[in-house]
Image (cartoon, helix red, strand yellow):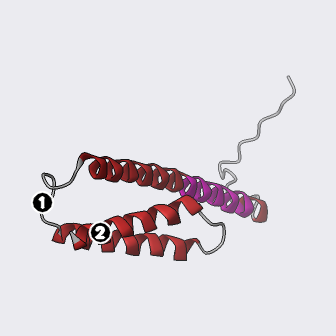
Amino acid sequence: MEQLVKFIQKTNQLASILEAGLPNEGREDYIQSIHDLLGEREQILKSLPDLSNKLDENVKQQLVNLEKNIYGIMLEQQNMIKKDLQVLQLKKKKNNEYAEPYENVSIDGMFLDKKK
């Protein structure tokens, strides 16, 4: 039961960090702390015996709801990070096009006249 209490504490700690939101500054530290907590939870979970018969339904439901909440928040934050990366790549591409505007010019010498 001591391991279960540790697991619940780590899960609550993870949920509180995730609910605080994704910071604009220091994202690497934030992601590293989440990764560390997930690793600690995994180690505790591996050492837990099969308690499915010993736990009451209220505790089981609380853990399931907490896991769903954590999963949803993590997916949301993952999508935010992906979106930020796409915006950053687009900015980098546009900045490069602005710095070197004739880099991608066709070499075939074709000229299109707009007059009829």
Identify residue for label 1.
50
Separation (CA) of disc 1 from disc 2: 14 Å
Question: In the displayed structure, does residue 55 sit left or right of residue 61?
Answer: left
Of the residues shown, which amino acid type is indicated by label 2? Answer: Val
Q: Residue at x 32, y 49 (%)?
A: 64
Q: List the single residue furthest toward the right.
A: 115
**In front: label 1 or label 2:** 2
Disc 2 target residue: 5
Query: What residue is rendered at 67% in x and 50% in y?
Result: 106
111 shown above or below 41: above
Instruction: Classify mark 2: helix, strand or loop.
Output: helix
Q: Is residue 72 above or below residue 3?
A: above
Tell me if residue 20 is in the magenta stretch. Answer: no
Q: Residue furthest top?
A: 116
Please name the predominant secondary structure of the magenta segment in the image.
helix
Residue at 45% over, 48% down = 72
Q: Position of residue 83 (x, y in %)?
A: 59, 52
Q: Is residue 103 left or right of residue 50?
A: right
Query: Image quadrant of residue 98?
Result: bottom right
Could you tell whether 109 is left or right of 9 in the image? right
Q: Nearer the viewer, residue 99 or 62?
A: 62
* Residue 109 in picture, x, y percent from top left: 71, 48
Instruction: Point out the image quarter for the C terminus.
Output: top right
Magenta residue check for 84: yes
Find out whether the residues at labels 1 and 2 contact each other: C-beta distance under 8 Å: no
Task: Please report the bounds of the magenta region as a residue range.
Answer: 80-96
Tell me which amino acid carries mark 1: Asp
In the image, 77 versus 21, the foreground residue is 21
In the rendered image, residue 31, in percent from the top left (x then y), is placed at 49, 70
N-terminal of the pair, mark 1 or mark 2, is: 2
